Amino acid sequence: MAADPPAAGDGRASLGLLEAEPPAADPGATLVFERSYDLLVGDKGEDRFELPYAPPACGRPGFAFDSAEIVYVSRRFGEAQVVSTPEPGCVRCGPVVVRRYHEPTGKLHYRLRVLRRTVVRPCAGEGG
């Protein structure tokens, strides 16, 4: 379900959500969001990544936010930086915010890897 990347220099930004190859023990534990910018006049701004979490059902496993990191695909005179993340362990989380820029004639193509950990919600009446 990833968007096609824009043609070089066409001034569009591509947006997409990808499911990464999950670790064998935790399917879906890693989410990957991808962004690409190549405006000829340069660009800067913030990207907000809403995290698709729902509380796990009673006694069932679910995912909680753990951490986020930038992985560059390609860049020239550009940078991205994670400036805001939810608290580790949250299930209903706010967005991850990335501040980014690239100079004129530059480009920026990055992936945000969001790592999640498995949590199990105890049922009512159980200890914990």
Image (tube, rainbow, N blue to C red):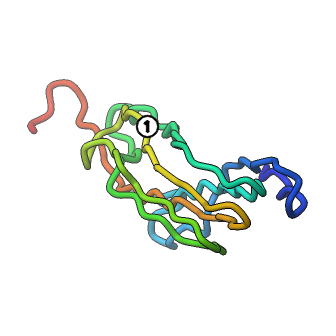
Q: In the figure, is residue 105 to the left or right of 101?
A: right
Q: Position of residue 84 (x, y in %)?
A: 34, 45
Residue at (41% x, 45% y) in the render: 62
**Count of residue discs:** 1
Task: Identify which amino acid the numbered label 1 is placed on.
Answer: Pro
Q: Position of residue 115 (x, y in %)?
A: 42, 60
10 Å crowding of disc 1: few (<14), some (14-19), many (20+): some
User: Residue beneath label 1, please?
Assistant: 95
Q: In the figure, is residue 38 to the left or right of 121?
A: right
Q: Quadrant of the C terminus?
A: top left
- Numbered disc 1: secondary structure: loop
The foreground one among 26 and 110 is 110
Q: In the figure, is residue 10 to the left or right of 71?
A: right
The foreground one among 21 and 36 is 36
Residue lying furthest top: 124
Q: Position of residue 39 (x, y in %)?
A: 76, 54
Q: In the figure, is residue 33 to the left or right of 30?
A: right
Residue at (37% x, 32% y) in the render: 92
Q: Position of residue 101 (x, y in %)?
A: 55, 55
Residue at (38% x, 41% y) in the render: 60
Residue at (34% x, 57% y) in the render: 67
